[in-house]
Every structure is written in C-alpha cells, then in structure tokens.
Amino acid sequence: MIWRTTESGARASRAPLACAALSSTLPQIDPAQATGEAADLLAELKKSVGSVPNMAKVMANSPALLKGWMGLSGGLAGGVLPGAVRERLSLATAEYNRCTYCLSAHSFVSKRVANLADDEIERARHAESADPHTAALLALSAAIARGRGAIDETAFKTARAAGVTDAEIAEVVGNLALNILTNYFNIVADTDNEFPLVTPHQHA
C-alpha cells in the first residue's frame, strides 16, 4: 500500500513508548517519541512513503508485526501485479471483510495515487473490473477468500483462459494474505480512521 498523509514532529529519545490517547482498542505509538526497533521502523516508513498511517502507529505496539507487514507489502509492491491492480484487490477484500479503515484508506489511495476512476473503484468493491484481465484476477481472489483457500478447477480454468500467469496467481494469494492481515488487525484494533470515510455496503 502507498500512503500519502501528513506527519510532523522529530523523533525524541525517551525510554517508554509514548501512546496517543485515542479511541482505538490498541494505542497509537507516536513516531516522535517511539524508541528502539519501533522507532527505526516508523522512521523507515515515513522516509519511504512520506507519512505514517494510524494503522502503522498501532502496529508499532509489536515491532515484529510492523516489520512483517512492511516486508510483505514492500515485497509484493515489486511483483508482477501493478499498483492499480493491487489496490483493486485491496478494495475487494476490505469490502468482503467489512473493514471500514482499509476500505477508506484504499479508496483514497486508489483515487489519489493509482488514478482509478470512481466507477472502477466501485466495481473493485464487488470484485469486478471493466478490464477483463483485472476482472479475472479479482474473481480468483474472491473465490479463494470465499473458499478459505479451497477453490474448484473451474475457477482456475477461468483465470487461465483470461491469461492469468503462475506468478500472478501466487501474488493474488500473497496480496489476499496481506489484505486479510490488515483487515483483521484494523477491525480488532478499531484503528482511528484518518481518511475520508467509506463504509462497506450492506450485504444480505
């Protein structure tokens, strides 16, 4: 995920981790007052993308988790799936898992960074796309999510018929795992949303 929010303040050298008093189930770690590995990771994140999202501040309660998320996210960003496709996958998974924070964040990034049109963002929330190849990737990801990893041969044949490669299939699974991680984490943590609010659709 590429984040573009604002962040200010210099890193300070205090022994305890300073936490913001917000409404999240888990506290936010203030990057300006973080220490140890948490401080290093938050500084690295800010340097690479220009800001530190609230999710990362909450993840910093466990530097191991923050490091894992950054590593997987960074690794997949260098894969065969372009950013606009990965954002669509994120939107579809956030909608499926009903994660308001992730849906808000990825709607913002999809429009402002990936330059997706509003109608394409809406399609992605339903695991659909006007582009046939992207639609096949979204359908495959949705089938994997619904089946908890178990999908029938028809789903694979449909993806193959649309030209989906072995590398793309592997990265669809990787992105799904990454998105489930962030969805579940933000739902559990009730992370404070700093993005324009987008709420999941009401599903039957």
Image (tube, helix red, strand yellow):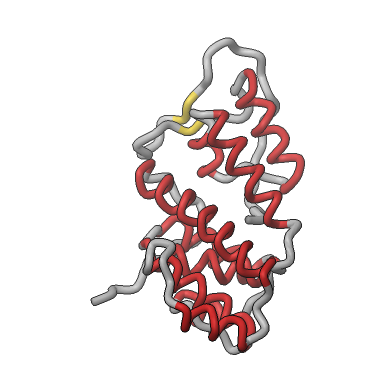
Nearer to me, 72 or 173: 173
Q: Is residue 32 left or right of residue 44?
A: left
| Quadrant housing residue 34 | top right
From the viewer's perspective, is residue 156 above or below residue 105?
below
Expressed as whole percent of the image width and height from the top left, the position of residue 172 reads 58, 65
Expressed as whole percent of the image width and height from the top left, the position of residue 197 reads 44, 62
Residue 122 visible in rendering: no
Q: Residue at x 51, y 36 (%)?
A: 59
Q: Residue at x 53, y 76 (%)?
A: 138
Q: Residue at x 74, y 66 (%)?
A: 80
Q: Quadrant of the N terminus?
A: bottom right
Q: Quadrant of the C terminus?
A: bottom left
Q: Residue at x 66, y 14 (%)?
A: 13
From the viewer's perspective, is residue 14 above or below residue 158?
above
Nearer to me, 4 or 134: 134
Q: Is residue 149 left or right of residue 124?
A: left
From this viewpoint, which residue is outermost toward the front?
Answer: 153
Q: How many circles with numbers are drawn on the protein?
A: 0
Nearer to me, 157 or 81: 157
From the viewer's perspective, is residue 171 above or below residue 132?
above
Residue 192 visible in rendering: yes
Nearer to me, 159 or 191: 159
From this viewpoint, which residue is outermost toward the left?
Answer: 204
Expressed as whole percent of the image width and height from the top left, the position of residue 180 reads 46, 55
